[in-house]
Image (cartoon, rainbow, N blue to C red):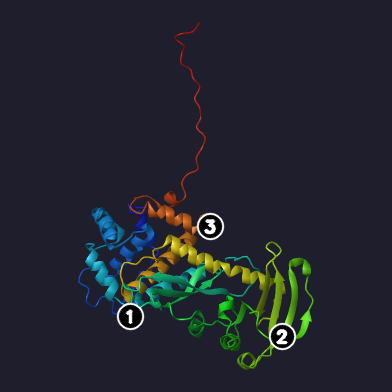
Amino acid sequence: MNRGRTIFAQVMQYIPHGEFARCVEKYDGERYAKSFSCMDQYLCMAFAQLTYREGLRDIESCLRAHQSKLYHMGMRATIARSTLAHANEHRDWRIWADFAQVLIREARELYLTESFGVDLAHTTYAFDSTTISLCLSLFPWARFRKNAGAIKAHTLLDLRGNIPCWVYVTPGEIHDVNALDLLPIEAGSFYIFDRGYLDFKRLHHLTSHAAFFVTRIKANTRYRRLYSSPVDRKTGLRCDQTIVLVNFYAHRDYPDKLRLVKFIDPVTENRFAFLTNNFTIPAITIAELYRCRWQVELFFRWLKQHLRIKSFYGTSENAVFTQIWIAMSVYVLVAIMKKKLHLQSLSLYTILQILSVSLFEKKPILSALVPPKCTKLTIMPDNQLNLFGY
């Protein structure tokens, strides 16, 4: 029931305050805080993400213009640009990383039965990275090339609900395949990779932990066919083979058998060759799983377009990581709200667009997100007498 609360406060009510306090206490986040708490910092940064603020001065101006409403939005301190900048630079970014993981666990439970387009009972992940360009003179710690700076966000996306369940941020010069060494592995789950992650030693590490992978084989990969299984060529499949690697180093890194599935897209007529260590699911499911890998690319594009992770409010490594993790947590928080309010008909894009212009309004959040349907106006009969009748 809405009791005069702003829409922003109604969104933030889904924050688990007990878990938030534990994350702050773990890293002693409020050791030197006098008035500007970690919750004040999070609410300011969440407001900036939801309303697309351009910088710290922009955040300060917008919030001070509504000073009388800030208390009802949960902000207890006076908002100052210098105070927020100091908090972003000095408070440990791992507070927000751990809090995002709390929200991710809750979101994954809510979306556990969500369909992602493939009839598969296993948990399925898509793994990839996105590069965020930075100015090397302002971010000297984020070296990418000689005259360029960048960071990479290596992301493991749960395809049920498109929830980013693991994110690892590195300088841009770190190669993508190195992130596989830190990837959390769940037995029985599927991991979908692009061809850039084809490293047989690391892929065999997944196999040794009873996990499955789907990736694309490179054209220069040498292998020997052991036997073939029949396929329905009408579906676009061309072969389903059991192979073993013959190159010395590749066979040393991956001595077990592999499954090779070749497929032609019926629409684009593009040819694909998929490599996997699963021999039980149908061959067409392998192709469908790799098609779902595109969801992580769409997630990156959506994140860069609708959340503030391309321009940063601070230049230090801690400030950048703080902003990225708070952006991730806001994304997951809105996904949790969408599920709990049963807003399946609305996309996250639509929800964020509506929230961006209505956070200060005091009305039930459902009335803002789901406006009443427009009805046709009833034309009343004209019973007025005609004064000039002929």
The percent position of residue 137, horizontal first and vertical second, equals 32, 73
Which residue is located at x 31 percent, y 75 percent?
316
Q: 42 above or below 362?
A: below
Q: 366 above or below 37?
A: above
Give the residue at mark 2. 243
Question: Which comes before the other along the chain, label 1 or label 2?
Answer: 1
Q: Amino acid at mark 2?
A: Ile
Farthest residue toward the right? Answer: 230
The percent position of residue 273, horizontal first and vertical second, equals 68, 75
Give the residue at mark 1. 26
> At numbered mark 2, what does the secondary structure look like: helix, strand or loop?
strand
Q: Quadrant of residue 85?
A: bottom left
Question: Which comes before the other along the chain, label 2 or label 3?
Answer: 2
Q: Amino acid at mark 3?
A: Gln
Question: Which comes before the other along the chain, label 3 or label 1?
Answer: 1
Q: Which callout, 2 or 3, points to the residue nearer the camera?
A: 2
Q: How many marks?
A: 3
- Specify whether 280 is left or right of 366: right
Separation of residues labelled 3 and 1 (CA atoms): 36 Å
Give the residue at mark 3. 344
- Specify whether 308 is left or right of 70: right
Q: Is residue 111 at all visible to an observer of this figure?
A: no
Classify mark 3: residues with Cα within 10 Å, few (<14), some (14-19) or many (20+).
few
